[in-house]
Image (spheres, grey):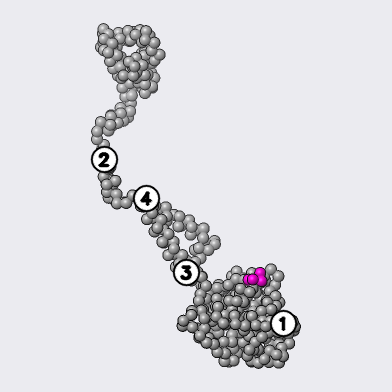
């Protein structure tokens, strides 16, 4: 076992496992840091599509999907993926977050917008997250604040649905308690009554806006009552253009996902550059972590031993141009050695030995030819190889 192997703290397989575990942990941590706020739906008991409470809109979203509408949740404050053919539903937005500027940002592509006014003040349950402990009607002044942001000269009221005029949907009658309406000359009615409009278009806005003044029509506790579900779907059909999608906005409920440089790194077109950088970092780490343990000893300046001596001598002879002389001396030594082994006379005179060795080789049927003097012009290596091959065949490989 070499010194390097003895000093090695961990093997190659251990290095691979450490890099894999560390890499997975690093990627997981970065993923949670960057995208953690988008994993899974938030828990809320308010009037939101994420809510399963009585005042939530989760059932309405499921109904739309069951009816084969293409429904998506929008958490982008700038709504960059929404087009002019789509419908944005802003249901019971937080008045503290709502403004005309935010509304224009969400509908900048002139998409149809449906705004659902708020109605209830709720208190979340301390025992069952996502449920409410109690609910009370909002003061009508609070509803008026949001109505004023959307409709000019608006007046929010509450009354009865018994005398509603169903202009577009005469076959569907809503079931609402403490029904909420808005009066304004700037509204073009869809469903109206003596107390005001339940559904209407906003004529004064330069945006394509419609309002639903009572959220109980689409709330979890009211969607199943009477013809509420039919009326809600009919309203969607009126507002949604052919081929359009439905986006339920959650940015005005406080669930906006803000863009940042880390998230942009993992979105096109920056994703390709990020992947290249990650691969480069991985290769650098892999290259630097190929071995663990004590540093390898430095290579000696000069090698030692027989092999090093022979190699250095060969390099000196080659660099000095003495190859031909070495090959010639090797040939002479081969001839003299052959004469000595065959006990020939004049064993030290190569010129006298050559004819005798050639005759013996001919009698033995040796195919390799002993190089003659006129072949000394061959390349030194080729000449030395011929002497060596002749010697091996002459003496049976010894």
Residue at position x 34%, y 16% in the image: 396
Q: Earlier in the sequence, mark 1 or mark 2?
A: 1
Circle 3 residue: 36
Helix, strand or loop status at disc 4? helix
Which residues fall within the magenta stretch? Answer: 65-69
> What percent of the width, then of the height, locates residue 134?
52, 87
Helix, strand or loop status at disc 2? loop
> What percent of the width, then of the height, locates residue 225?
65, 82
Mark 4 or mark 2, which is nearer to you? 4
Q: CA distance from mark 4 to mark 2?
A: 34 Å
Q: Earlier in the sequence, mark 4 or mark 2?
A: 4
Residue at position x 42%, y 59% in the image: 24
Does the image show residue 24? yes
Q: CA distance from mark 4 to mark 1?
A: 71 Å
In the image, residue 207 sits, relative to residue 121, either above or below, namely above
Circle 1 residue: 172
Residue at position x 70%, y 75% in the image: 237
Circle 4 residue: 13
Residue 204 is marked as: none
Count neighbours of disc 1 (C-alpha within 10 A) and say few if under 14, some if 14 to 19, many if 20 or more. Answer: some
């Amino acid at each position: 076992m070499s010194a390097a192997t003895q000093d090695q703290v961990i093997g190659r397989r251990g290095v691979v496992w450490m890099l894999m575990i560390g890499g997975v942990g690093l990627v997981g941590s970065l993923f949670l840091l960057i995208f953690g706020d988008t994993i899974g739906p938030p828990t809320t008991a308010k009037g939101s599509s994420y809510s399963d409470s009585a005042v939530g809109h989760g059932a309405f979203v499921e109904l739309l999907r069951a009816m084969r509408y293409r429904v998506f949740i929008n958490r982008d404050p700038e709504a960059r993926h929404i087009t002019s053919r789509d419908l944005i539903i802003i249901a019971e937005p937080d008045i503290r977050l709502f403004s005309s500027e935010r509304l224009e940002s969400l509908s900048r592509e002139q998409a149809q917008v449906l705004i659902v006014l708020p109605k209830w003040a709720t208190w979340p349950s301390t025992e069952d997250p996502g449920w409410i402990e109690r609910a009370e009607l909002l003061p009508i002044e609070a509803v008026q604040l949001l109505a004023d942001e959307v409709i000019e000269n608006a007046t929010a009221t509450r009354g009865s649905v018994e005398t509603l005029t169903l202009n577009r949907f005469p076959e569907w009658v809503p079931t609402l308690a403490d029904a909420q309406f808005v009066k304004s000359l700037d509204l073009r009615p869809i469903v109206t009554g003596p107390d005001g409009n339940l559904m209407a278009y906003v004529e004064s806005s330069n945006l394509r806006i419609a309002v639903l003044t009572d959220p109980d029509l689409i709330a979890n506790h009211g969607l199943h009552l009477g013809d509420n579900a039919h009326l809600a779907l009919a309203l969607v059909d009126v507002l949604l253009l052919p081929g359009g999608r439905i986006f339920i906005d959650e940015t005005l409920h406080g669930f906006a996902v803000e863009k940042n440089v880390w998230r942009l790194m993992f979105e096109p077109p920056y994703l390709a550059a990020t992947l290249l950088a990650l691969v480069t970092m991985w290769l650098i780490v892999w290259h630097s972590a190929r071995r663990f343990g004590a540093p390898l000893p430095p290579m000696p300046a000069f090698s030692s031993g027989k092999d090093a001596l022979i190699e250095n001598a060969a390099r000196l002879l080659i660099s000095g141009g003495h190859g031909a002389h070495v090959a010639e001396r090797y040939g002479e030594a081969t001839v003299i050695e052959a004469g000595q082994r065959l006990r020939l006379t004049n064993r030290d005179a190569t010129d006298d030995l050559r004819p005798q060795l050639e005759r013996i080789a001919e009698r033995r049927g040796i195919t390799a030819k002993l190089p003659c003097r006129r072949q000394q012009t061959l390349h030194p290596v080729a000449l030395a190889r011929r002497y060596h091959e002749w010697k091996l065949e002459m003496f049976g490989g010894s």
